[in-house]
């Protein structure tokens, strides 16, 4: 995948949130070297509630090594973290956070 682009009322603040809360250490041009691993590309039904708000058309998913630690870190930083997590046999564990612009993000600790 070559990139993911977000609209934001304050792009600098949103970029800082992704850096400070999720550790996304992109450079001044937005370039970020991610670790090797699986990437899922999947289409969902138009009426899905999985993305949170029905107005959100896409959802970003980040692979994490330790879901519980990441969710705790996000809560400590005051982020809007969903209470529930989900386990999928053979796939892994999932949790969710909403960024300051209202975009729901999925966090995935693979099996």
Image (tube, helix red, strand yellow):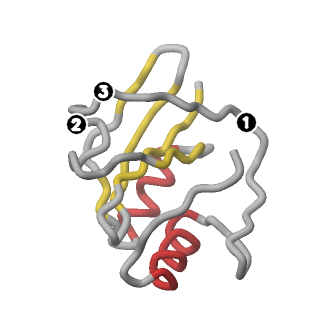
Residue at 21 percent across and 32 percent down: it is 47
Residue situated in front as seen by the camera: 100 or 80: 100
Determine whether 11 is above or below 91 in the image.
below
Residue situated in front as seen by the camera: 56 or 107: 56
Q: Earlier in the sequence, mark 3 or mark 1?
A: 1
The picture places residue 32, in percent across and down from the top left corner, at: 73, 63
Q: Earlier in the sequence, mark 1 or mark 2?
A: 1
Residue 80 lies in quadrant:
bottom left
The residue under label 2 is 49
Residue situated in front as seen by the camera: 102 or 45: 45
Q: Which mark is residue 37?
A: 1
Residue at 71 percent across and 82 percent down: it is 28
Q: Which mark is residue 106?
A: none
Judged from the image, the secondary structure of the residue bearing numbered disc 1 is: loop
The residue under label 3 is 45
Residue at 34 percent across and 37 percent down: it is 85
Residue at 35 percent across and 47 percent down: it is 57
Q: How many residues crowd mark 3 within 10 Å: few (<14), some (14–19), many (20+)?
A: few
Asked whether the beta carbons under mark 1 and mark 2 sit within 8 Å of each other, the answer is: no
Determine whether 12 is above or below 48 in the image.
below
């Amino acid at each position: 995948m070559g990139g993911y682009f977000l609209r934001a009322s304050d792009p600098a603040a949103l970029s800082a949130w992704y850096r400070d809360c999720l550790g996304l250490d992109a450079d001044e041009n937005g370039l970020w070297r991610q670790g090797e691993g699986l990437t899922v590309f999947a289409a969902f039904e138009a009426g899905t509630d999985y993305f949170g708000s029905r107005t959100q058309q896409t959802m970003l998913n980040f692979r994490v090594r330790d879901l519980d630690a990441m969710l705790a870190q996000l809560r400590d930083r005051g982020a809007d973290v969903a209470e529930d997590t989900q386990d999928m046999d053979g796939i892994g564990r999932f949790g969710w956070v909403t960024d300051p612009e209202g975009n729901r993000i999925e966090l995935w600790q693979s099996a």
